[in-house]
Image (cartoon, helix red, strand yellow):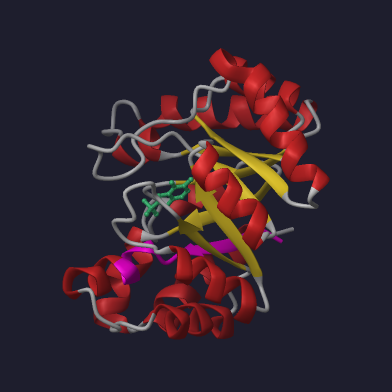
Amino acid sequence: MIELGVNIDHVATVREARKGREPDLIAAAKICELAGAHQITVHLRQDRRHIQDRDVEHLAQVLQVRLNLEMAAVDEIIAIAHRIRPYVVCLVPENRQEVTTEGGLDVASQAKKLKTVVKGFHDDGIKVSMFIDPEVDQVDASAETGADYVELHTGAYANAGELDVLGELDRLAKAAARAINCGLIFNAGHGLTIRNLAPVAAIPGLNEVNIGHSIISRALFFGLENAVREILAILDEYSA
Ligand code: PXP
């Protein structure tokens, strides 16, 4: 069964446009949960442009499904994660100017530091995922850190033109196979939509996808429950 994490950051983006209470992030999370999502994903950015500390605290209290906290591996956010204790943290690169997470985390250049971060989370019973580009050396470095999962960045695949899309899919499949060989659980995310999800879902061993922007976008027209369900229906077709 391929599982779905719904990234609800953009519900908070709309709320923060007015710094008010609407739309209600917790209600959104609960609708995703009721529609069958297996996980709620949020990114607590250092600039707090969408998700706020209190959101993560509330979600940790009320969710029945898993909470996946995306975060930069910086001291301030690491301390918050240790305090709130989500089910899993997904370590991502963060650049204050970016519109969204642009590339994968360069685990290979900081494997030693990240190994310590992973151990700290494991000591607190928190699982760790590395959000990386689909490259074998990044997979190997992730395994070295002791992480539980890699989330392969599907942005290049999602943005590829007709000429490059098969090559990008092949990169994903090769990195996925390497991850599984290394004993890592393989997840995927970024830029996935109802139109481009199927070939990724067909990659052997896929455990979970995290999808945000396209679900929240389609929710504007079809409702959040329907937007979640249509992704789940695609995943179902490719689930063993
Ligand atoms: N996974 C990770 C690690 C991300 O950083 C993001 C974007 O915040 C997503 C998945 C979801 O990407 P999208 O919003 O493009 O579906």
Region rendered in magenta: 1-12
Residue 160 lies in quadrant: top left
Left or right of 189? Residue 118 is: right
- Give residue 150's position: percent from left, percent from top: 63, 37
Q: Is residue 208 visible?
A: no
Quarter of the image with the C terminus is: bottom right
Above or below: residue 185 compared with residue 141: below
Vertical placement of 179 versus 50: above or below?
A: above
Tell whether 74 sits left or right of 25. right
Q: Name which quarter of the figure residue 94 lies in.
A: top left
> Relative to the observer, which residue lies in front, 234 or 158?
158
Give the residue drawn at x 22%, y 37%.
97
| Residue 194 among those drawn in magenta | no
Point 25% across, 78% down: residue? 220
Q: Quadrant of the N terminus?
A: bottom right
Is 136 situated above or below 21? Answer: above
Q: Total label count?
A: 0
Which residue appears at 42% of the width and 67% of the height? 8
Which residue is situated farthest in the left direction here? 18
Find residue 107 and report its horizontal and vertical position in percent. 57, 22
Q: Is residue 2 within the magenta segment? A: yes
The answer to which of 77 and 161 lies nearer the viewer is 77
Whole-percent x and y of residue 31?
A: 49, 84
Question: Can residue 145 be seen here?
Answer: yes
Which residue is pictured at 67% across the width and 17% down the height?
Answer: 112
Name the spot of residue 123 as percent of width and height, x first.
Answer: 82, 44
